[in-house]
Image (cartoon, grey):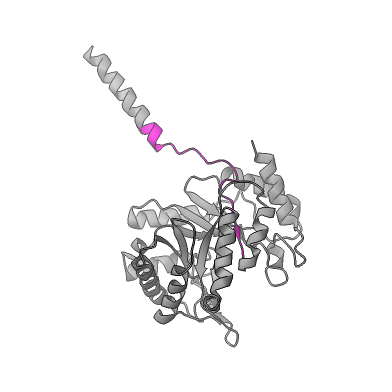
């Protein structure tokens, strides 16, 4: 009898461990959102996702934007009405002469935060990204400076939390395909330098932020498994797990293919595979492909709508994939 009870207890214990360790993949397409560049574009997101699912939208906020409170409150009003959750990426100002984004000072950071705190977000968690791809000199005052960025990340995070408005902090995403040669620095070398400067640095963030593109050339198959692939976020999550012991959830705030031959031929199938096998990962909070509308401009080949607001091949491919996978 005792032997039987021991076996039963072992079986129950094994079943309990299996149940709580198993994380089923989420429904295909559930995490999908969009990266936009201007507040007015919020009204076009539902032309892609015609459903009632709450979805995320990533958008940059510059210092210049803080001069137009009304425009941004309209954006938050519209986002709430459209069931869209903003992820705000902080930015400074672009120096045209030197061709880079300026490094923020503390006064500018406080200006950005005060502006965000004055707006009605209509949501409990308020997601803020602390600048962008700082392992590129062009994104950080023409410099590669993990020490300075670590300081800025800590300062910004601490100030946001002092507002007591439930801001949730995401770090600047790294370019996972960047070379270890100026004007860039390899992503994990950058992160490792930050960690060596301050082993507590990752305690200042709440979620991870990733730009997991299908590289090389924004054209690779979604079946690729390298650091510079759609699965790049997995390498990052493993890295911060090793350093902190924490299991971060991740926002993939930029990803997507460039539109050209032969990528266009496979684009719908690429989306199907990514939706089923990669972006369904339970650790992913959101995937916001880049970019809703970058046409005219350097991001035209990534755009879901062209200069005339007509849908591009990206829109048709993603919508076909979502329809194919819908229950």
The N terminus: image quadrant? top left
The image position of residue 273, as x and y in percent, is: 63, 45
* Residue 311, magenta (yes or no): no
The C terminus: image quadrant? top right
Q: How many marks can you see?
A: 0
The image position of residue 105, as x and y in percent, is: 42, 81
In-image side of 196 versus 253 (left or right):
left
Which one is nearer the viewer's eye here, 270 or 203? 203
Q: What residue do we see at 46% from left, 74% from top?
A: 112
Residue 289 visible in the snapshot: yes
**Residue located farthest toward the bottom when viewing the structure as drawn:** 97
Q: In the image, is residue 327 above or below residue 34?
A: above
Q: What residue do we see at 39% from left, 32% from top?
A: 18
The image position of residue 35, as x and y in percent, is: 60, 61
Magenta part mainly helix, strand or loop?
A: loop
Q: Quadrant of residue 100?
A: bottom right
The image position of residue 188, as x and y in percent, is: 45, 64
Q: In the image, is residue 137 above or below residue 259?
A: below
* Residue 27, magenta (yes or no): yes
Q: In the image, is residue 200 above or below residue 272?
A: below
Which one is nearer the viewer's eye here, 296 or 87? 87
Q: Which residues are magenta?
A: 17-37
In-image side of 259 versus 149 (left or right):
right
Residue 211 visible in the snapshot: no
Q: In the image, is residue 296 above or below residue 127?
A: below
In-image side of 115 versus 256 (left or right):
left
**Residue located farthest toward the left when viewing the structure as drawn:** 2
Which one is nearer the viewer's eye here, 240 or 302? 302
């Amino acid at each position: 009898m005792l032997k039987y009870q021991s076996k039963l207890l072992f079986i129950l214990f094994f079943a309990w461990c299996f149940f709580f360790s198993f994380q089923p993949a989420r429904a295909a397409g559930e995490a999908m959102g969009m990266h936009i560049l201007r507040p007015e574009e919020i009204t076009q997101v539902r032309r892609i996702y015609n459903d009632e699912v709450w979805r995320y939208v990533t958008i940059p906020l510059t210092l210049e934007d803080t001069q137009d409170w009304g425009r941004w409150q309209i954006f938050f009003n519209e986002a709430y009405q459209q069931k869209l959750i903003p992820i705000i990426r902080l930015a400074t100002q672009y120096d045209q002469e030197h061709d880079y984004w300026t490094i923020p000072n503390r006064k500018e950071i406080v200006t950005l935060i005060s502006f965000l705190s004055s707006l009605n977000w209509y949501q409990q968690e308020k997601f803020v990204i602390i600048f962008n791809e700082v392992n590129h000199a062009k994104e950080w005052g023409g410099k590669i400076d993990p020490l300075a960025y670590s300081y800025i990340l800590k300062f910004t995070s601490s100030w946001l939390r002092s507002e007591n408005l439930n801001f949730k902090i995401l770090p600047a995403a790294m370019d996972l395909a960047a070379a270890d040669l100026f004007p860039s620095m390899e992503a994990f070398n950058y992160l490792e330098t930050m960690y060596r400067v301050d082993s507590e640095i990752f305690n200042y963030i709440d979620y991870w932020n990733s730009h997991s593109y299908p590289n090389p050339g924004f054209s690779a198959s979604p079946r690729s498994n390298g650091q510079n692939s759609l699965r790049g976020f997995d390498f990052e999550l493993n890295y911060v797990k090793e350093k902190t012991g924490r299991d971060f959830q991740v926002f993939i705030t930029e990803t997507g293919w460039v539109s050209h031959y032969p990528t266009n031929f496979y684009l719908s199938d690429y989306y199907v595979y990514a939706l089923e096998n990669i972006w369904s990962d339970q650790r992913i909070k959101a995937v916001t492909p880049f970019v809703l509308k970058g046409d005219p401009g350097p991001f035209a080949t990534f755009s879901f709508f062209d200069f005339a607001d007509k849908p591009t091949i990206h829109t048709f491919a993603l919508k076909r994939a979502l329809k194919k996978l819908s229950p």
